[in-house]
Amino acid sequence: METLRGIVQRLIYQNESNSYCVFLLEDYNEERIVCTANLEAPKEGDDLEVTGRYITHKKYGRQFETATIERLKPDTLYGAKPYLINLAVRGLGEKSIDKILAYFEDDLITVLRAEDPVALLEVPGLRKSVKEDLYNSLRGEGILQEINRFLEAAGLSSRWSRILYTTYGGAAINVLEDNPFRLLELDSTITFSMADTLRAALEIDPGDERRIEAAVIYTLRNISDNGHSCMPADELIGLVFDRLGGYAEEIATRIEELLEYGQIIGTDYDGLLYIYSPNIYHAESEAAYLTQQLMADSEVIPLDMEAFIEQFERNKQIHLGDAQKEAIQLALQNKMALITGGPGTGKTTIIQALVEAFQQTPQNRILLCAPTGRAAKRLTEATGYEATTIHRLLMPIQGSDSYDFTKNEDNLLEADVVIVDEASMLNVQLYYSLLAAIPESAYVVIVGDVDQLPPIGAGFVLRDLLDSEVIPFVRLNTIFRQKEGNRIVRNAHDINHGDMPELTPVGEFTFREVRSVTEMMHQIVAFYTSSLENVTDELDVQIISPMRRGVAGSVAISKIIQEAVNKKSTLRSEVKINGQIYRVGDKVIQVLNNYELEVFNGEIGVIFAISKTEVSIRFLDKEVKVPMEDMTSFMLAYAITVHKSQGSEYGIVIIPFIPTYNQMLQRNLLYTAVTRARNKVIVIGTKGAIQKAVQTQSGTARYSLFKERLQGVI
Ligand SMILES: Nc1ncnc2c1ncn2[C@@H]1O[C@H](COP(=O)(O)OP(=O)(O)OP(=O)(O)O)[C@@H](O)[C@H]1O
């Protein structure tokens, strides 16, 4: 390890999501050194002492790989000013700093370096709150350095120091010494094994109850990644046992205690004890309660149904099927109604009819919504009424967890009717959040295709609502789509029934047999490029792959397409982010919700300009300038996964489907992919893979007691 001391001249690069940064340090011999660090980025003008080692980077040459950074307090008056500015205390501008300099003169250095710089509170002519903030922040600097050293000594990155400091202040180290697993509460990206590293460094016994407790809570928090809302106690013990490598008895005891203290919650059902995280328990039980409440006072809305249907049929020039009529009737007779059906069975038509029907009644403040932007847009286009995403409707609170909304039980939506489309994508937390914000007097209509993939997150609300048989529902079975896309619809229904789809090519459904991954890639490139010629907007062609990773995953396919259609060229600017090159013309997808930019998970766009600081992206409905540091939540999107495509629709869909996808060859996955297409489906793969998918009903069940709660058996 070497130690360097110098002033930061410039911050060259900063990646906010993982704290990687590059900066230029000038030492006291005026030698400039490029430093890289996986630490909180320093600021221009900071006086630093860094430790680390020199390396020679393949591309960038000699660099200093920084392991620790210590921000030094100034030892000259010259250094005092930038130091104070960089503390970024609100209200402390140049003028205020000049007042401080004038008051202390040469003594300022001693004051700044004091362990307790209380003298700062005496400076005349400064607002009290500014002085207090400055005082606290100076004290904080010292504590921050201590936290840095504490984490580094345990072999952990000091990138967590600031959040530790803002959460626990001066007590941060004590808190972690007392329980290293408190780290897990700070940030969901901190894993159990990171906290366990700190535990080992503090020489806390692996059988310690704090470790066992943390493992239980952590494991439970993560079961929703597999769609579970809860888990039978024995199975949970098994998972925690695997994580800890033993301690079965202690785990069971700890679970009992956590249950007693309400830190986890249990529900007895059918001879088993199911364990929940409190937030999911709350969402599931409240969602069931609110659903029952809503249903309790159903009142029929007066409307001359016959006259309305006649009028609607006349305007639309169609005859509604019996099930369609029943669906309309049901929604006007019950506070909640469910409508499910496959593609082309007339769900959107019913939504349109319902909007028109409700408009003729006193219940005429109608909200249309869907889980994704694309679904909302399609709904708007198909019905002629403005639809929005559920997130936009509920207005997420920035900076809080993803299910904290401005609209909630204390600040209700102003609506008489709420119609939700693509409801197969509702997990129990989103459903609960929505229901909580809907006034008790409102009518709710839930529309979706229950045979699509289950949602991301805990629970499968639409399926449970239907299976509970507590809420009136209609299943639409007749396919009405006669013209364009009919083979797509019929094949989708075949797949859904477990039958082999018709593969002899017609215009709208093409199957291309391939024998290898290489051949598949060639075909994908060929079909992708030729498809582009048949659309006006390249966003209307989408490759949808069953998997993200692997040789045939969406990431690999995207790279190959990028090379084929958007190669490196002097005519196109490009930028490298986290090892991935993005060029003007590339198609990209946002993979997190960015509330500030209002670009949400799953939105796809095309890059049209790249500057030093930002990337301009055109989405379906807007153009957005994305700051460079926010680009880390984007990926190439020539190909996306079926999961990411849910709730969206494209003119032309290309689906690679070969045996390599193995365990992903499932019926509802192929069904969901095929039903994303409006005009054309191109499947590139093998008949064997399609056969396997058609015969394979999706994998493991999801643990949830939502249905049972709705039925009132719990
Ligand atoms: N009763 C009907 N008679 C004739 N055509 C109908 C009838 N109902 C719906 N259609 C037509 O069938 C097509 C598919 O209907 P719609 O879009 O409502 O179905 P959907 O279930 O929403 O399908 P998807 O989920 O695939 O969008 C539309 O062109 C619609 O106008």
Image (cartoon, grey):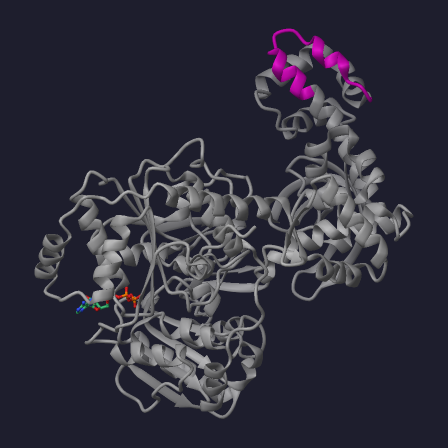
Q: Nearer the viewer, residue 556 or 422?
A: 422
Residue 496 locus on image (x, y percent): 40, 77
Q: Quadrant of residue 523?
A: bottom left
Residue 650 to residue 223: above or below: below
Residue 264 locus on image (x, y percent): 68, 45
Work out whether residue 578 can be spotted: no
Q: In this image, 713 relative to 211: left or right?
A: left
Residue 481 locus on image (x, y percent): 22, 73
Work out whether residue 139 can be spotted: yes
Q: Nearer the viewer, residue 592 or 114?
A: 592
Q: In this image, 276 relative to 623: left or right?
A: right
Residue 506 to residue 349: above or below: below
Q: Quadrant of ligand 1?
A: bottom left
Q: Is residue 123 a member of the stretch shown in magenta?
A: yes
Q: Which residue is painted at 34% across and 88% down in the image?
A: 502
Q: Which residue is painted at 39% across and 64% down in the image?
A: 585
Residue 297 to residue 481: above or below: above
Span shown in magenta: 115-134
Q: In this image, 623 relative to 259: left or right?
A: left
Residue 712 locus on image (x, y percent): 51, 50
